[in-house]
Image (cartoon, rainbow, N blue to C red):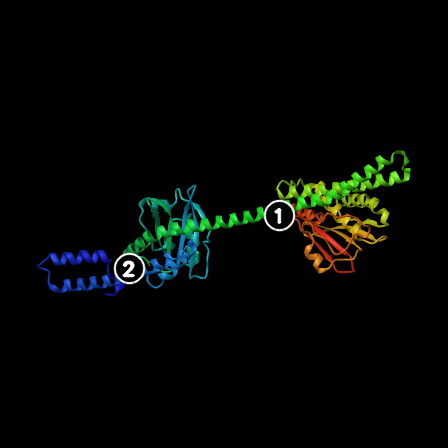
Amino acid sequence: MDESSEPPFSQQIREVARLLNESTEPPRPLDRALRGLAGALAREVRLMEKLQEVLLRINEGRLLDEVMNALYDGFKGTLPYDRIGLALVEDGGVVRARWAKTDLPVVKLPVGYAAALAGSSLEGVLRTGRPRVLNDLSRYLEEHPASDSTRLVVEEGIRASLTCPLIVEGKSVGFLFFSSRETGAYEAEHVDAYRRLAAHVSLLVEKGAWASRLAVQKDEIEKKNAELRRLNDLKNTFLGIAAHDLRNPVGLVQMIADSIIQSGDKMAPETRRELIAEVGGLCRHALALLNDLLDVAQIESGVLEIKPASLDPAVILRETAERHGRLATPKGTRIEAEPPPPGAMRADPLRLRQVLDNLVSNAVKYSPPGSTVRIRAKREGAGWRVEVTDQGPGLTEEDRQRLFQDFARLSAKPTGGEKSTGLGLAITRRMVEAHGGKIGVDSRPGAGATFFFTLPD
């Protein structure tokens, strides 16, 4: 009789005890029983040594995956399995696959797979607290065709399984699933070994699960702290911009106002008009800066609301060209809108106008006098691509790296002395992304630039 066909250790002990108590029993059966017991003891010692070795190894693991990988590798060749899976019981009575490892080439039951515990066969395993052996999964699936998890592991090539409940201080925390491609792989001796293994592993799994959850929470906290630091830096930058860029125009307005008041009727009407026009320009710049700062603050706080509507691209482009054409007249710059293909785009009208205004005003700002800025829209896939092309100096690679970032300053200078807050393109990027689109630029030094953005339908 080979070792694999011998009865379980506990049964052999009972047999030896029976033979020893029956004095009339001839020596030969007792000899056979003692030899069988010796073999069983040897296997038991090997299993206990391996169990001790693996437990020492998995005790070194801190996270759940480390514990389970050590478990999977440690018992290879000692216990039969081609796959080990771990599922944890979550709040709400859901059993979710948390970890799995297999030597098989096909994986059908993925980590993350979840099912309700109530009414399932696993509920019965927890209720009894005893391992469950299914030595013919193909037959079990025929009898239980609604078992989706069984169907998936059968498709992987699994033919037998042993399910061990994991219980810590009377609380059910999950299940260990040992699976084999061999039908009839699990016997009573294996059940006893797996039961002892599960009892040791339960605490380690619970410890590993807590450590994994704490690690995830630690990562989330670190990310939130990093985001808070970024927002704090942004706030400080806002305050610096407000203190510097607003102080200058406000100071000039005050100085001009004082000059007008002190001169009284002595100031020439033409000089007075020029000073008042200068006050208007300074106020527009300060107002633009404040609007940009408020837009960024609104976006960063997560309260930017997009209200998409069906819009006619031809109307949007024409109105943009007309609006900026009047402002570009002093530079002799023309704004041309190419007729788009028929159709409708979905976007928030207010935010889309803001995006186009930023891109077109930038194009005018950096284009030489007498140049042309073109606006076009075309279909791209299931959405739209809108482009604004200028005849300005183009962008260096260093400029391209800084584009769309907060307070970016480019090497090129406005051709008409216009002022810039360095926030327009950053705001534009955020608003395009809030629509689910992307923004970019095609440019090279000396060849103008084409800023574009996409809008999904």
Q: Is residue 274 left or right of residue 297?
A: right
Can you say whether 259 is above or below 143 in the image? above
Residue 441 image offset from top left, x and y in percent: 72, 55
Residue 406 seen in render: yes
Say what amino acid the circle numbered 2 marks.
Met
2 vs 1, front mark = 1
Mark 2 surroundings within 10 Å by alpha-carbon count, few (fewer than 14), some (14 through 19), many (20 or more): some
Which residue is pictured at 76% across the width and 41% down the height? 251
Q: Mark 2 vs mark 1: which is more N-terminal?
A: 2
Front in this rendered view, residue 226 or 447:
226
Quadrant of residue 66 in the image? bottom left
Q: Quadrant of the N terminus?
A: bottom left
Secondary structure type for disc 1: helix
Residue 406 image offset from top left, x and y in percent: 67, 49
Q: Which residue is mark 2?
A: 48
Residue 300 image offset from top left, x and y in percent: 63, 44
Residue 123 image offset from top left, x and y in percent: 36, 44
Q: Is residue 409 left or right of residue 101?
A: right
Q: Residue furthest front?
A: 262
Residue 113 seen in render: no
Give the Cα separation between the discs numbered 2 and 1: 59 Å
Q: Which residue is mark 1?
A: 233
Say what amino acid the circle numbered 1 marks.
Asp
